Amino acid sequence: MRVSPDNALKLLVRLLRRDSAGVRRCVETTPDALDELASIAADRGLAVVLLRSLADSALMEGVSADHRRTLLARAELQSTRCTVLEEGLERVAALFAAADLPFVLLKGPYLAARFYGDPRGREFRDLDLLVRRADRPRAFGILSRAGYARRSRILGSEALTAFFVHGFDYVAGGVNLDLHWCICRHPSLRLDEAALWKRKKTFRLNGRAYSVLSEEDEVRLQVLALLRDIERGRPQMKNFVDLVQIAAELDPAMSWDSLFTAGRLDGTHGPLVNVLTLCVDVVDAWRFVPRLAATLKKHAARRVGAPQPAIEPASRATRYANRLWAARSYDSGLGEWLGWWALSLPFRRAAHGWPRPVPPRVRSAWRGPR
């Protein structure tokens, strides 16, 4: 019996949360569940997460030799990639420090270290940095002088394109870097940049202290990122796992009521209610987030009804259904959402959909302090 994406996620989350009874039920229901999960994980950027959750466990015997080799190959590839990205992060951090330009480290090695226990405990392909909007031109200049090529294209002007997107993509020496100046672009959002920077925390990674988002803003970032993926019709399985893992880790101390109350003011209320409910519901993770579950129950009236978004849309119709669900999840009317979607689409495609080829000399170029 083939394991559906939803059931694969349920099994993986139970492995991560060390829910032995839940894992046993999943495996008993579908004997090939672990082997199917291994196949799915290898293709969806979850190989490292799965391998770590199976380490020193007899459950690894439920994974076939072929899939085990594939998982190990993916993990080896990620280890090599991490070495390059870690070196790139050190160099970029030194450049920004020399220019006295602060940044916040998003996702990538921080997410892996904070919520999976190891900077290399989750697969990632690039670095994500957030700078203040006012510092955007200076950040562009620093990266350009360091040999980074901007892969995002510009429509009209740099400022006009930046108005419609939340970041530009750069590359140098095998390091892909996404430079953000806000966590999300949408007319319904009223996120306070100054407050976000005031709330930021510090996290030590490989011996260096980095600024990172507060726990509340981390949840906002992940929720809005997944909602964008659903809006595009292509939600990624690993983002569902991330959000459940983050919510479960933060649940004992997080003031969910305060977060949702603030969401009514900054336009994140609908996204928070719907995306978090979706993630917890898809993997049946309610018991891992009891305090969040209680808060979501209070806000159930804001939930968007069926059909639930498909994790892996198989047709154009399901992709359109995903977009409609996302549109109704934002705290805006359908007309406002459609207008923004149509107006911003050329700029989003230029910045992220059709990147320019990178000249060979740029791929290997790198200038910066060692």
Image: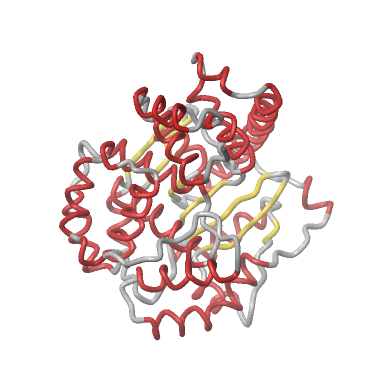
Q: In the image, is residue 126 above or below residue 62?
A: below
Q: In the image, is residue 304 above or below residue 286?
A: below
Residue 239 placement (x, y as % from top left): 47, 48
Screen quadrant of the C terminus: top right
Decide if residue 89 is in sight here: no
Horizontal relation, residue 190 to residue 27: left or right? left
Q: Place residue 46 in its image quadrant.
A: top right
Number of marks drawn: 0
Horizontal relation, residue 149 to residue 227: left or right? right
Which residue occupies the foreground of this view, 139 or 71? Answer: 71
Residue 53 placement (x, y as % from top left): 48, 25
* Residue depicted at 59% across the width and 76% down the height: 347
Q: Place residue 302 in its image quadrant.
A: bottom left
* Residue depicted at 77% across the width and 57% down the height: 358
Horizontal relation, residue 56 to residue 186: left or right? right
Residue 327 placement (x, y as % from top left): 41, 73
Which residue occupies the foreground of this view, 266 or 168? Answer: 266
* Residue depicted at 36% across the width and 54% down the height: 278
Screen quadrant of the N terminus: top right
Q: In the image, is residue 41 above or below residue 307?
A: above
* Residue depicted at 18% across the width and 54% down the height: 297
Q: Residue furthest right?
A: 360
